[in-house]
Image (spheres, rainbow, N blue to C red):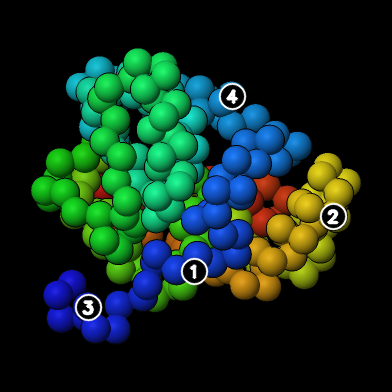
Amino acid sequence: MERIDSWKYNEFKQVGKDYSSEEEVNVYESSHADFRDIKQESVELIEKLKLKANDVLADFGSGTGIFAMEAAKVCKKVFAVDISNKMLAYSKNKAIQNSITNIEFCNSGFLNFKIDDESLNFATSTFSFHHLPDYWKGIALERLNKMLAYGGCLYIKDVVIEKKNSTRNIQGFIDRQEFLGGDFLKEDAEVHFREEFSTYDWILDGLLERSGFKILGKELYDGVIAEYLCVKE
């Protein structure tokens, strides 16, 4: 990566919502509670991944740390990786309050996080991967593949667009967000599709496979949300 440092994408630049803002960080959990239960999602994901006591996991875009803290109750070590120092400070404080000591909080991202090759058993990303343009998604996946041990798993859940009826599905998603959270969530959804980098599922399929992953499971919801469970071959 050293050769491209002069033109590498700046993943620390906030895209969409500005999570370097303490105000945005403080309302993150309450605003998301209008349309998702992050704690329950975290518990279910731990069961899905079948995490074990000796596992090492890195969660990219760790946000307020809900999943990282749940995973840390099971895993040997968790890396909570986020580009926002405000998010990391918030989640670190929660970990201290809950006496959780096996999380390493890293102000980094997909393109900059450094760890020894093949030292992770799991890499996860929930609603964070869309912050990278497609070319850099490919670079990020190649890096993640190197970080994972052979047979290690990659989990991605994100806004991913199905080609069929894409415009109708996107508008349907925006309308549902407005119903659930009024103008705040409506505007958040509109900014996402206008300014962020969600891609087609067939593009993400190809990027994963070309980066050395086998897709074990793929679920599409309402044409705009996708879950991928992949293994390093």
Is residue 59 left or right of 21 when viewed as pictured? left
- Label 3 sits on residue: 5
Please, is residue 157 above or below residue 95 in the view? below
Which amino acid is tagged 3?
Answer: Asp
Residue 13, image x, y percentages? 45, 68
Query: To which quarter of the image does residue 142 belong?
Result: bottom left
Of the two numbered discs 2 and 4 in the rendering, the one whose residue sits closer to the viewer: 2
Q: Quadrant of the N terminus?
A: bottom left
Mark 4 in CB contact with mark 1 (< 8 angstroms) = no
Residue 74, given in percent of the width and then of the height, sits at 33, 18
- Classed neighbour count for the residue bearing mark 2: other residues with Cα under 10 Å, few (<14), some (14–19), many (≥20): few
Does 176 sit left or right of 137 as displayed?
Answer: right
Q: CA distance from mark 2 to mark 3?
A: 39 Å
**Which residue has dot 4 on it?**
40
* Number of the label disc, if any, that sits on residue 203: 1
First along the sequence among labels 3 and 4: 3
Position of 218 relative to 129 (above/below):
above
Residue 112 found in image quarter: bottom left
Q: Residues within 10 Å of mark 3 (few under 14, many from 20)?
A: few
Give the residue at mark 2: 183
Labels 3 and 4 touching (C-beta < 8 A): no
Q: Type of residue at label 4?
A: Gln
**Local crowd at mark 1 within 10 Å, few (<14), some, or many (≥20)?**
few
Marks 1 and 2, Cα distance to the nearest angstrom? Answer: 31 Å
N-terminal label among 3 and 1? 3
Q: Amino acid at mark 1?
A: Ile
**Residue 68, image x and y in percent?**
40, 32
Taking the view exactly as shown, the residue that stands out farthest to the left is: 116
